[in-house]
């Protein structure tokens, strides 16, 4: 693990120990507090996926036409996190609405990373195709029962499998998380407002002002995502 990952793990451990000490009235110092960790240049920067490579990946998804590739397709034009997509229930996909969309919300088997992660995303392009295929094929309450059993979302297993396939198809520079980096650039390319970018990606709000109101309506985010698709064709 790189140093930033180690720091995140230690932060979780510190919080757990602090909570246990507080709840049980344990006096003393948390042994995980103040741990020295040197800064190292071992952080790998995720590369966004170029549009031509993205189109090639999507084409390969349609050719394979199986549930792991439906999952990749769903992520590719929404920018969802892998765990968000893998942990979807079938009822989270709304295909018969005027604007087809996915409702990303908390489930007992899959928590969300931040409060901003709860959102509704229009389904366009290859993501709409992936959602349609998964819904029509599912015989389970879960959209991707291979990776979600109603108790746990096996996002690590999904990540290992899909990253291996992605490297074969697109090269070693890209991983599943690269789709999120790409989506941010794709939204910038159509002059999408920064607060809408954060809303679409489920990134934390950057200012107090962004917390006011209900945010952008589905119609507006649909217009932007359609612009992204049209701009690239």
Image: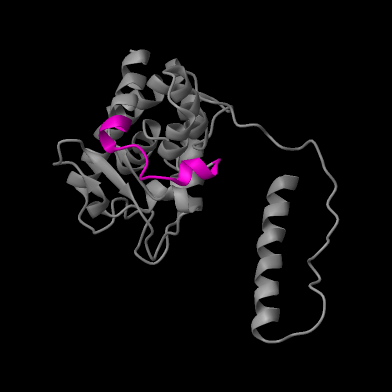
Q: Quadrant of residue 36?
A: bottom right
Q: Where residue 95 appears, x then y in whole percent?
A: 18, 41
- The verdict on residue 212 being magenta is yes
Q: Is residue 9 left or right of residue 68?
A: right
Q: Is residue 114 left or right of residue 30?
A: left
Count of numbered tags: 0
Q: Where residue 105 appears, x then y in whole percent?
A: 36, 54
Residue reaching furthest to the bottom: 25
Residue displayed at 39% across by 20% down: 56
Q: Is residue 176 above or below residue 14?
A: above
Q: Where residue 161 appears, x then y in whole percent?
A: 47, 44
Residue displayed at 54% across by 29% down: 174
Q: Quadrant of residue 124?
A: top left
- Image color mode: one colour
Q: In this orientation, does residue 204 appear?
A: no
Q: Is residue 22 above or below residue 50?
A: below
Q: Where residue 76 appears, x then y in whole percent?
A: 39, 32
Residue displayed at 15% across by 41% down: 97
Q: In this orientation, does residue 226 appear?
A: yes
Magenta span of residues: 206-221
Quarter holding the C terminus is top left
- The verdict on residue 55 being magenta is no
Q: Quadrant of residue 149?
A: bottom left
């Amino acid at each position: 693990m790189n140093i930033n990952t180690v720091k995140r793990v230690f932060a979780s451990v510190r919080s757990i120990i602090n909570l246990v000490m507080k709840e049980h009235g344990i006096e003393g110092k948390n042994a995980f507090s103040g741990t020295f960790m040197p800064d190292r240049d071992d952080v790998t920067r995720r590369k966004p996926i170029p549009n031509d490579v993205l189109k090639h990946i999507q084409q390969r998804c349609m050719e394979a036409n199986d549930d792991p590739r439906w999952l990749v397709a769903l992520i590719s034009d929404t920018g969802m996190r892998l765990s968000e997509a893998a942990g979807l229930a079938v009822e989270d996909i709304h295909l018969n609405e005027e604007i087809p969309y996915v409702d990303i919300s908390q489930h007992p088997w899959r928590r969300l990373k931040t409060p901003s992660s709860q959102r509704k995303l229009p389904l366009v392009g290859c993501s709409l195709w992936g959602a349609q295929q998964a819904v029509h094929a599912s015989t389970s309450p879960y959209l991707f029962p291979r990776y979600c059993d109603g108790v746990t979302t096996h996002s690590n297993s999904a990540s290992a499998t899909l990253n291996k396939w992605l490297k074969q198809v697109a090269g070693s520079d890209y991983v599943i998380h690269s789709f999120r980096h790409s989506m941010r650039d794709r939204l910038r390319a159509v002059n999408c407002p920064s607060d809408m970018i954060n809303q679409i990606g489920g990134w934390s709000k950057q200012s107090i002002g962004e917390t006011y109101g209900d945010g952008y309506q589905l119609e507006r985010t649909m217009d932007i995502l359609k612009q992204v698709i049209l701009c690239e064709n």
